[in-house]
Image (spheres, grey):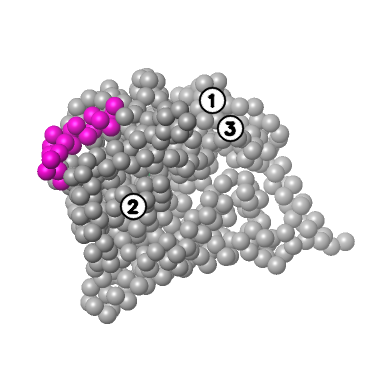
């Protein structure tokens, strides 16, 4: 009797599960970890409440710094210390730099073309290098104009409508990183392309969540045709692929058209790509995905850092006062001006406030997962080939030995900033931007935008906790963050109070100038 297609899929699934289960049972020498639960299903995490980094941190207390678990037939190792993350992801990066298999995202939607989710192939290395070069400290000054303009708009909007500060910050970061990528400013939040990007990021959150798609667990299901009953995932994948392809195509084509019409494409990462010699169709395809990565990876991450900064300033008025004292001493009070990039070396405390913001709540608390490409042995434990390796950056940055009293927001913990390499409290940038061959290529851009924003806000505004209308007591913003891969403070309220009449005049003048240049 011929098998129906449903029976065939069920049988194939059973055989795949059995094989994976038998395989996991044979292992010896794995690190300790939580009980495996059901055969093959292992430790199901989908339903674990709250952020994953808290769960991993709890496990570290019970099982040790290196924790193993198995979930749906896959091996996972969580590294909870800086040393283990460095030893493996940096010092053995040759075998720890691929990304986990994600059939839905990588194969069906097409993220195998991207930088962040593709394996560490020569193609990925080429794309990373191209982005890294464009965003190296030497090449960043060409984007300062755009950063200063978006910053000026944000400062003005904070005066007009402080209650919506989260929107103002989001728009500042998103628009400036978009302009870095493509050299123009979206018209509004309802810009068709921005809406598409928003949808694309929502898609991403759906298929980046482990366990959301059976096809990630049983990859052979990718061969099921889209019309097959129950194959909604195929149709979702096709729609998501259309969106990401459009996002890679539309703004890039606009820059190309400008170059064709005007002979130059302005100043942007894409414009530089288009100037490259030997621009073959294959290279152009890679550049489309590289430009997309600048926006996709650079907007929410930097927004998250500013939200954390605002939250921490409202909770720590003493730190804020010290930061302002440094700014005032260098830039004046009666005749104040806004800090510019040239002032950075003379404002060491502001750097420390930024680093402490990074440490206190890293925007990407678990980094991105790496995949091991061959069996390995570390500290007497065996890690099987194919293991997904996760650095618990959140736990590393709250390590009580490296960062005594980790929940205290204390910029002074870094000592003299000229000597951050020798600080007792390690430079948090060593962990929060990831590790080894896959570390963040946008680090310098992120830091520059964030430094400008926080130094400017501190210069002209005092961030205050709102007052309880009945008691008059300050209501500190809660320490509540979203649980996703890029974690952000949940909406909270604070007051932005201009520091003086002079500060207000300066904000208005800066805003006016930024508005005049808004479309340039
Ligand atoms: C505060 C802001 C940012 C944080 C905290 C951050 C953090 C990270 C982390 C943790 C990773 C994964 C590293 C690893 O796998 O070990 C990463 C990768 C990446 N970041 Fe960032 N990032 C930020 C801003 C940016 C910006 C502005 C860009 C713009 C270009 C960017 C582009 C990328 C790209 C393309 C990757 C993928 C690299 C790869 O897979 O090889 N990031 N980032």
- Judging by the rendered image, the residue that carries numbered circle 1 is 58
C-alpha separation, residue under disc 2 versus residue under disc 1 = 44 Å
Decide: is 142 above or below 78.
below
Q: Is mark 2 within 8 Å of ligand 1?
A: no
Residue 69, disc:
3
> Upstream in the sequence, badge 3 or badge 1?
1
The magenta stretch spans residue 463: no
| Badge 3 element | strand
| Badge 2 element | helix
- Judging by the rendered image, the residue that carries numbered circle 2 is 160
- Magenta residues? 318-337
Q: Quadrant of residue 289?
A: bottom left
C-alpha separation, residue under disc 3 versus residue under disc 1 = 14 Å
> Upstream in the sequence, badge 2 or badge 1?
1
Residue 153 or residue 411, whichever sits in front: 153
Query: Does any portion of residue 28 appear in the rendered image?
Result: yes
Taking the spot 21% from the left edge, 59% from the top edge, the residue there is 513
């Amino acid at each position: 009797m011929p098998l129906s297609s449903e029976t065939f899929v069920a049988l194939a699934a059973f055989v795949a599960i059995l094989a994976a289960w038998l395989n996991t049972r044979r292992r010896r020498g794995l690190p300790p970890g939580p009980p495996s639960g059901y055969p093959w299903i292992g430790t199901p995490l989908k339903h674990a409440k709250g952020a994953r980094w808290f769960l991993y941190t709890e496990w570290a207390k019970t099982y040790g710094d290196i924790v193993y678990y198995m979930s749906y037939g896959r091996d996972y190792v969580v590294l909870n210390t800086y040393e283990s993350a460095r030893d493996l992801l940096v010092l053995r990066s040759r075998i720890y730099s691929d990304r986990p298999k994600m059939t839905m995202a990588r194969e069906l939607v097409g993220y195998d073309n991207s930088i962040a989710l593709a394996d560490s192939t020569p193609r990925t290395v080429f794309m990373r290098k191209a982005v890294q070069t464009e965003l190296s400290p030497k090449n960043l000054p060409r984007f300062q104009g755009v950063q200063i303009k978006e910053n000026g708009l944000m400062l003005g909007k904070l005066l007009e409508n402080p209650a919506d500060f989260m929107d103002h910050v989001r728009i500042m970061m998103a628009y400036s990183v978009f302009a870095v990528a493509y050299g123009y400013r979206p018209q509004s939040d309802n810009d068709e392309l921005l809406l598409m990007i928003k949808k694309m990021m929502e898609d991403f959150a759906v298929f980046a969540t482990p366990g959301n798609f059976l096809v990630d667990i049983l990859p052979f299901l990718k061969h099921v045709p889209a019309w097959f009953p129950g194959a909604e995932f195929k149709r979702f994948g096709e729609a998501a692929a259309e969106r990401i392809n459009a996002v890679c195509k539309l703004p890039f084509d606009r820059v190309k058209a400008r170059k064709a019409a005007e002979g130059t494409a302005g100043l942007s990462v894409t414009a530089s790509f288009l100037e490259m010699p030997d621009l073959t169709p294959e290279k152009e395809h890679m550049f489309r995905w590289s430009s997309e990565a600048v926006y996709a990876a650079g907007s929410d991450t930097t927004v998250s850092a500013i939200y954390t900064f605002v939250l921490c300033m409202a909770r720590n008025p003493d730190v804020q006062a010290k930061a302002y004292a440094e700014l005032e001493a260098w830039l004046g009070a009666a005749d104040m001006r806004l800090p510019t990039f040239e002032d950075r070396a003379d404002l060491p405390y502001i750097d420390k406030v930024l680093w402490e913001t990074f440490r206190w709540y890293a925007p990407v608390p678990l980094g991105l997962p790496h995949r091991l490409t061959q069996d390995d042995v570390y500290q007497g434990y065996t890690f099987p080939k194919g293991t997904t390796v996760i650095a618990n950056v959140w736990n590393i940055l709250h390590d009580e030995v490296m960062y005594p009293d980790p929940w205290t927001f204390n910029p002074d913990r870094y000592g003299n900033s000229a000597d951050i390499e020798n600080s007792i409290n390690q430079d948090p940038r060593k962990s929060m931007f990831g590790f080894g061959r896959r570390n963040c290529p946008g680090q310098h851009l992120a830091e520059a935008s964030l430094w400008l924003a926080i130094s400017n806000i501190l210069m002209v505004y005092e961030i205050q906790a709102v007052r309880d209308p009945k008691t008059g007591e300050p209501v500190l913003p809660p320490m509540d963050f979203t649980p996703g891969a890029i974690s952000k403070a949940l909406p909270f309220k604070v007051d932005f109070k201009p520091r003086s009449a002079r500060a207000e005049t300066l904000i208005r003048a800066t805003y006016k100038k930024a508005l005049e240049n808004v479309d340039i």
